[in-house]
Every structure is written in C-alpha cells, then in structure tokens.
Amino acid sequence: MAAQLADEPCEACTSEDEPLTEAEYAEYLAEIDGEVWEVVDDHHLEGTYAFDDFRDALEFTYEIGELAEEEWHHPDLHLAWGEVRVEMWTHKIDGLHKTDFVMAARMDRIHEQYAPDATSES
C-alpha cells in the first residue's frame, strides 16, 4: 500500500486548506511504516529510521534532502550515528496535509535500500 501512496503527487496546499483531522489522516498513516512513523499531537509526523552506521545515515539524509528540494516540502532532519529522525508537517496550514504522508511513504521507499540487515540473514 505504501508504494501506492509514494507514487502519488505531492500537491501543494493553499492557506485556505485545513489540517487533516485524525479521522482524515488515519488512512494515510496506515499506509506508511508504523515501525518508523507516528503522529504527534494531531499536528506533525515524527519518524526514526535505523542504520548500520553513520555513512548510511548520512547518505539517506542527503537523499531525503534531494527529495525535499525536488518537491519543495522540507522536513526537519536530525542525523546521528545509526539513525535519522524526521519531523514533518505542512507549515502553511500548521498541521498535517496528505503531502506529508506522501513524503513519508517516499522516505520509507528510499530507506528500504539502507535498512539494517536488508541483505543479510536470508
């Protein structure tokens, strides 16, 4: 399911749009990695991705930065050894928009190539 959400366009909202309610975002939340993401205070997404080392975390951060520039939707990124923490919401409406979940699904897709033990223990 996340693949479908990741393939949807990142559509900009207007200042007249309202933030998503819990009932509205529940469907999108179910489509992103529940091991990574949570909604905090019905306001923003927070997610933590794990990595085997600093290099992979750094490269993932770079890829997320490129995605953010491409879509002009910029999360807060916190890089540390073995993890990247992401905070994301739509600033224009000071809350969650479908685009936040599309971006999270795209980040989940990018992370698949970096996931710890992704190539070991078959």
Image (tube, grey):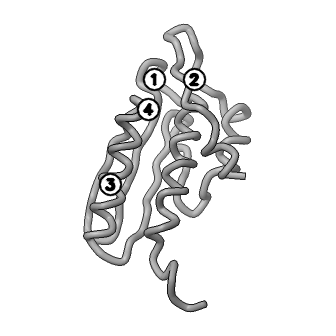
In percent of the image, x 50 and y 43: which residue is there?
45
For the residues labelled 2 and 4, the Cα–Cα distance comes to: 19 Å
Q: Estimate the x, y position of residue 13 in percent, counting from the top left.
A: 53, 18
Mark with earlier residue (4, 3): 3
Can you say whether 10 is above or below 113 in the image? above
Residue flagged by tag 3: what amino acid is it?
Thr
Residue at horizontal 33 percent and vertical 42 percent from the top: 76
Amino acid residing under circle 2: Pro
Residue at the image point whose x is 31% and y is 61% from the top: 59
Q: Secondary structure at mark 4?
A: helix
- Tell me whether the residue at label 1 lies in contact with that at label 2, contact meaning CB atoms closer than 8 angstroms: yes
Residue 60 appears at what percent x and percent y? 36, 59
Q: Residues within 10 Å of mark 2 (few under 14, many from 20)?
A: many
Residue, disc 3 = 61
Comparing labels 2 and 4, the label whose residue is closer to the camera:
4
Mark 2 vs 4, N-terminal side: 2
Q: Which mark is residue 94?
A: 1
Q: CA distance from mark 3 to mark 1?
A: 24 Å
